[in-house]
């Protein structure tokens, strides 16, 4: 099922501006697999002046012939010639293509794997583009390889790109439209499983309901997404064993560096580089209490940032043997009973991300984070949401509950006690807020439902 083209407004605008400019040049589009890079490209390309080619793993000779065939649709007779090398093909394209023509190569790293000289040849063509306005767009799912080809200071194409677009997962607010969900509760539950990856939404939309989609796509060993984390790691990391082990431990609840190192029986210092790679790829995030510095390593907590990976490592990884033995239906029934807790943690993340983009009260708030540590009475305490107003005068202090049956007065009283015990709040104006699947009006603490949160994340 093909979804409508969602959100990507800024990316589309910047890419179209590059494609319609008078001067030529290079644009780079990259990001993890299944985020819609190819769709973004196809939506933005000018049909009559564009050549679109998807690279693969074949030998360079075969790929040159295939690309020449595509160019032949724009430049008559182009594919009638056998090109002995990439230099000859690119030189002719730049010379004979119509003014302001576009050559778009999807999955550029696959092409470079069989032709390591290609980035330098593209650099030569871009540098000598002249006034014909020919431009080239390259995309790639392997962020590691794209960094090595384009973004690293030693790469041949470094500094040549006029536009570099990193495509990110879609915010949670778009999943209601993507999956045609009327209920905000159903939208949060779906986002907790599929995250913000459009291709996952397309696959889920072909199934009847969330439970069926989980069973067919994720839990079944034949499911399209059953081994998705392994594919993501293969795209970006040379050592997938260590990375997979770190993700599995974080997914199982080991959030401290010392815990992860202890379970792996390795010194913590040896994990700095693999953790940095996972952080850079957006698979893991590093949390510190609100108001603390990221340099405060003693209070750092590592968490899986992607909802789908969090779901997979919590429910699929521990059950691989049972799933391989054909017990997917039984595993899904057990997961359904535990899903509430998983959804609750994702809802907390969604709420925090909504804070800078929504009007909670009459203030504009900065980024929100969790706070944990000793309160004024020295007892340990944790608060789900803390943010500072844009003018620095006020704190937003809130709790997130994934429950349809709440005693709002009791929760508000508990939140007020926490705020009074919060060291950061001493001597400052504080606004209290509560979030839940649905929320009645209140004259006390601010109350917000899932619908309000999702609307902010569009």
Image (tube, rainbow, N blue to C red):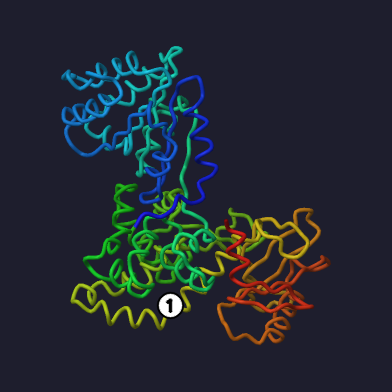
Identity of the residue drawn at 69% across and 62% down: 387
Q: Is residue 23 above or below residue 10?
A: above
Local crowd at mark 1 within 10 Å, few (<14), some, or many (≥20)? some
- Judging depth in this view, the residue of 116 and 344 nearest the camera is 344
Tell me which residue sits at (28%, 25%) in the image: 71
Q: Position of residue 130 (x, y in %)?
A: 44, 12
Where, quadrant-wise, is the C terminus in this rendering? Answer: bottom right
Residue name at image x 36 percent, y 54 percent: 2
Q: Is residue 17 left or right of residue 384?
A: left
- 448 and 51: which one is in front? 51
* Relative horizontal placement of residue 399, taking residue 152 as reference (left or right): right
In what quadrant of the picture does the N terminus appear? bottom left
Residue that numbered label 1 is attached to: 339
Residue 84, visible in the rendered structure: no
**Front-most of residues 251 and 19:** 19
- Across and down, in percent, residue 150 comes to 40, 32
SS state under label 1: helix
């Amino acid at each position: 099922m093909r979804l409508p083209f969602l959100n990507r407004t800024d990316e589309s605008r910047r890419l179209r501006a590059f494609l319609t400019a008078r001067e030529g040049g290079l644009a780079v589009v990259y990001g993890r697999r299944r985020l819609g890079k190819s769709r973004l490209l196809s939506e933005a390309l000018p049909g009559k002046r564009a050549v679109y080619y998807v690279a693969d793993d074949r030998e360079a000779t075969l790929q040159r012939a295939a690309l020449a065939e595509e160019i032949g649709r724009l430049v008559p007779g182009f594919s009638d010639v056998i090109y002995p090398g990439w230099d000859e093909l690119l030189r002719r394209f730049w010379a004979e293509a119509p003014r302001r023509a576009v050559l778009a190569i999807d999955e550029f790293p696959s092409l470079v794997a069989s032709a390591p000289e290609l980035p330098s040849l593209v650099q030569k063509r871009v540098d000598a583009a002249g006034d014909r306005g020919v431009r080239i767009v390259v995309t790639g799912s392997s962020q590691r390889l794209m960094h090595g080809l384009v973004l690293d200071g030693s790469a041949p194409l470094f500094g040549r790109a006029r536009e570099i677009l990193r495509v990110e997962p879609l915010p949670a607010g778009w999943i209601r439209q993507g999956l045609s969900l009327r209920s905000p509760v159903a939208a949060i539950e779906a986002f907790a499983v599929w995250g913000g990856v459009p291709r996952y939404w397309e696959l889920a939309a072909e199934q009847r309901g969330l439970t069926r989609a989980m069973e067919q796509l994720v839990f079944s060993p034949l499911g399209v997404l059953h081994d998705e984390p392994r594919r993501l790691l293969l795209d970006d990391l040379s050592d997938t064993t260590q990375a997979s082990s770190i993700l599995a431990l974080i997914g199982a609840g080991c959030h401290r560096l010392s815990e992860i190192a202890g379970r792996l029986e390795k010194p913590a210092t040896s994990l700095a580089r693999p953790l940095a790679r996972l952080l850079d790829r957006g698979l893991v995030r590093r949390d510190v209490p609100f108001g603390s510095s990221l340099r405060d390593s003693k209070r750092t907590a590592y968490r899986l940032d992607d909802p789908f990976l969090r779901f997979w490592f919590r429910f699929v990884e521990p059950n691989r043997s049972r799933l391989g033995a054909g017990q997917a239906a039984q595993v899904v029934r057990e997961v359904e009973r535990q899903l509430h807790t998983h959804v609750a943690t994702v809802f907390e993340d969604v709420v925090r991300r909504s804070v800078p983009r929504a009007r909670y009260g009459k203030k504009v708030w900065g980024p929100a984070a969790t706070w944990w540590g000793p309160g004024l009475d020295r007892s340990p305490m944790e608060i789900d949401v803390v943010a500072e107003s844009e003018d620095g005068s006020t704190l937003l202090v809130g709790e997130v509950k994934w429950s349809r049956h709440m005693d709002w007065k009791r929760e508000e009283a508990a939140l007020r006690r926490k705020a009074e015990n919060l060291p950061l709040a001493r001597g400052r104006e504080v606004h209290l807020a509560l979030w839940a699947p649905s929320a009645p009006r209140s004259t006390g603490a601010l109350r917000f439902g899932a619908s309000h949160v999702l609307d902010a994340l569009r």
